[in-house]
Amino acid sequence: MATIEPFERPGVSGFMHRPKTPKAAMLLSHGAGGDSQGALMIAVAQAFCEDGYAVLRWNLPFRQLRPRGAPGGSGERDRDGIRQAVKILRQEIAGVPLYLAGQSYGGRQSSMVAAEDHGLADGLLLLSYPLHPPGNPARLRVEHFPALKTAALFVHGTRDPFGSVDEMKAAIQSIPGRVRLEIVEGAAHGVPPATARLMPAWFNPAVTQSRVVQ
């Protein structure tokens, strides 16, 4: 039987969704305006836990420092926090693949960490990647994409102001690793929590099969 329990370690605070026998582990990071208790975060953690993943949905370091407000700065503190959380999660759930997942800002920081350290994670789940600020498509946040060799699944809505589907398709062409794009019709920035139940079926082939851009 799966369990959900508070998870507190030095620098890491959140909730562990633990199946009886984990086949993989996932670190799930929230967006810039949210925290680990968001509806999408909970839905994603539950969906992957039901599929055999031990999922740690946690508060990024900036959120641990204050309950509200944007991250600020370069995100370096949060990326260091992701590395620390991965180290702890590998000790907690040993001997299985480990994946990084995140919504918006949390996904971007996770992908930046993976681009810097190719061996840190076995795959990426990136929900509503914030390709550019709304209304400013020239400010693309893709500098690290050419160094991203970790297999990645992007889940993106057709009404996302942080990047259109066509813009996402063009941007991910620069990623050398395996990549898959799943499109959620009508979704804005932050796909509906109900979409979470579909994600394990999208994710498993995305990190094991060849490049698919739909």
Image (cartoon, grey):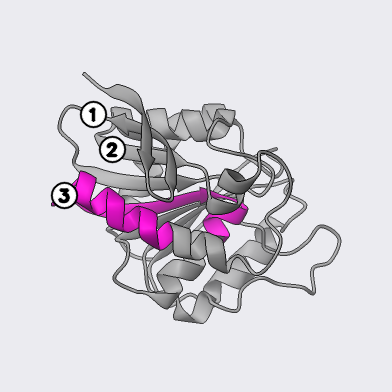
Q: At 60% across and 79% down in the image, what residue appears?
A: 143
- Number of other residues with Cα within 10 Å of mark 3, as a class: few under 14, some 14 to 19, many 20 or more: few
* Disc 2 to disc 1, C-alpha distance: 6 Å
Does the residue at mark 2 contact the one at mark 1 (Cβ under 8 Å)? yes
Residue occupied by mark 3: 94
Please tell me whether mark 2 sits on a helix, a strand or a loop.
strand
Is 4 rendered above or below residue 83?
above
Judged left or right of residue 116, residue 183 is right
Q: Are marks 3 and 2 in contact (CB under 8 Å)?
A: no
Question: What residue is disc 2 on?
Answer: 54
* For residue 119, side relative to residue 42 (left or right): left
Q: How many marks?
A: 3
Of residues 13 and 168, the one nearer the viewer is 13
CA gap between label 3 and label 1 equals 14 Å
Q: Residue at x 78, y 61 (%)?
A: 133
Q: Quadrant of residue 22?
A: top left
The residue type indicated by label 1 comes to Pro
- Mark 1 highlights which residue? 19
Residue 181 is one of the magenta-drawn residues: no
Q: Which residues are magenta?
A: 82-108
Residue 20: x and y in percent read 17, 27
Most foreground residue, 200 or 36: 36
Q: Amino acid at mark 3?
A: Ala
Which residue is rendered at x = 66% and y = 70% of the image? Answer: 141
| Residue 142 drawn at (x, y percent) | 61, 73
Looking at the image, the residue that sits furthest to the right is 135
